[in-house]
Image (cartoon, coloured by chain):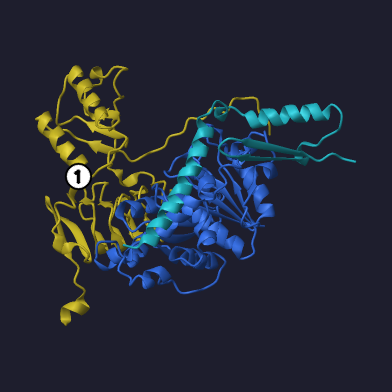
Amino acid sequence: MASNCTRFRLVGRSYVLFVLMPEPPLAVWLGELDVWARRSHGFFDRRPVLLDLSKLPLSKPELAALIADLKARNIPVVAVEGVDSQLLDFTLPPLIHGGRPGGESDADTVAGPAETQDRPCEPTSLLLDKPVRSGQSIVFTNGDVTVLGSISSGAEVIAGGSIHIYGTLRGRALAGVSGNADARIFCAKFDAELVAIDGLYATANDTTSYLCGRPVQAWRDQDSLQMREIVSSARRRV
Amino acid sequence: MNIFRLLRRRHTAQVAHDRLRILLAHERSRTANTDLVAILRSEVLAAVAKYIPVAIDQVDVNMDRSETLSTLQIDIHIPV
Amino acid sequence: MGQVLVVTSGKGGVGKTTSAAALGAALAESGQNVVIIDFDVGLRNLDLVMGAERRVVFDLINVIQGQAKLPQALIRDKRQERLYLLPASQTRDKDALTERGVARVIDDLRATFDWVICDSPAGIERGAILAMQHADIAAIVTNPEISSVRDSDRIIGLLDAKTEKAKKGQQVVKHLLVARYDESRASSGDMLQIEDIVEILSIPLLGIIPESEQVLRASNLGSPITICNPESAPGRAYFSAAKRLNGEVIPITIPRERNRLFGRLLGGRAA
């Protein structure tokens, strides 16, 4: 059926954004951010982030300066949360509110081998039967991710739930990103650049070399990230 | 010291040197950045086509460059 | 219908062009018709490695832009009559390489040749993506060195995401070709082990090409190693890789240089 109306459509879509929540003193926080970014090279590379200012009240020029500082670090701020709307004019990113922890958002795969679709009624887990290659980023915030192969150096898997890797973890694994502190990371062979659970992270420099090459699990115990070799019950009995 | 190996190595290096010299002389020359061959071919074809019908895919163009002389060979298949 | 093989690596200087020429010549020696396309617009090298630099009249860009017909741009190898070269343009901009033009050229070549080998430029930019676009098979050239392995991993990811096969939900058949393998450094423990590279990249091995001065000699002479010195260690390694591309199942070995006559006559002290 032909129609002369222009087919103007306004569609809502939800995305997962990383949230940066600066805390005073700002200079110290920026310094920590730099340390983080250096250890995990390329992590923020033009990845859009939301700036939550509820812990750090800023004046308009201060906010503009902070956004410029972040931009200089290749971190584009796409929206701001937790400030008075009066503060933001058209030169600054828009105010956003009503965000939920990421659990209810769509699954999204960036340049990944597996296409995921939003199927809310089905159990939410993602199975990757191919290795995750350098440069690929798999984002699945609806639940657990199982990787049958390895995660290469320079690749990353970001999951709302736990991450299970049956090959070698050489890249980055970020579990529980939607605020799930019970999420865990398991891998058959550990050689990671970075592991993170619900915001707590450890880079290759932080982890003991003892774990390297062994089967490892990582979990969050209150405010610390724990890692331990997985010893199978069969081996323990020997 | 294996003198034969030394001689042989020098031998292919000399070949490489000569090939490069000829190649770079041509690439640096005035004609390198123009489509001289394409222009020549189309003008020669146009001249021939004034007298005989010629199909463009019935033309073989070959080139050989040496240090002092380049040859451009245009074979035009003329229908009987 | 011929098969399209892309020789790619991500990293530069690992031996893509040498491998494309050597595999192409080896496949032609086995009686198949082969064309090798140089995709490195602006920095062409394949014509030099194959010794055809003085015979280039038209190139890939001329064909894409309609200034020459495809058969006019093909250069037939003087030593191996079943081997052809389609050179890249040295003077044009790489933007002249259009997706549609490349598709047309590859379709035409596929109809007449048994093998269409695409010699990819380094990097992961447009030229490299266009070179892999229509591939059925990929040979990923890797040196036993960490940066090369990581770049190869990245390229494998792109082969799984950006090729026509991937867009149809199929897979490019991927093979690993380890080049510049140095046995003495491997035994001293200063080089990544083949098993480690295979484990990291998790694709099957097509061949191991030993580091050899013969490769440099062949390039100086402008002749693929499989034509100029088929009995050399790298020559034999490329011949068995070509056999594997043809579906033969033969065990992977690392060929060694056979004892040279001169070396023995002079008491082998040079070695």
Residue C268 position within the rendered picture, expressed as x and y whole percent measured from the top left: 33, 70
Q: Amino acid at mark 1?
A: Arg
Asked which quadrant contains residue C149, the reply is bottom left
Total numbered labels placed on residues in the image = 1
Q: SS of the residue at dot 1?
A: helix
Q: Is residue A192 above or below residue C195?
A: above
Chain A on-screen colour = yellow
- Left or right, A225 with reference to C172: left
Query: Which quarter shows the C terminus of chain C?
Result: bottom left
Which residue is more in the foreground, C94 or C222? C222
Residue located beneath label 1 in the image: A39
Asked which quadrant contains residue C104, the reply is top right
Residue at the far right: name it.
B80
Chain B on-screen colour = cyan
- Left or right, A230 with reference to A7: left
- Left or right, C43 with reference to A197: right
Residue at the far bottom: name it.
A238
Q: Is residue A193 above or below residue A89?
A: below
Residue C140 position within the rendered picture, expressed as x and y whole percent measured from the top left: 44, 56
Residue at figure coordinates x 29%, y 40% from the top left: A100
Asked which quadrant contains residue C69, the reply is top right
Query: Which quarter shows the N terminus of chain C?
Result: bottom right
Residue at figure coordinates x 23%, y 47% from the top left: A179
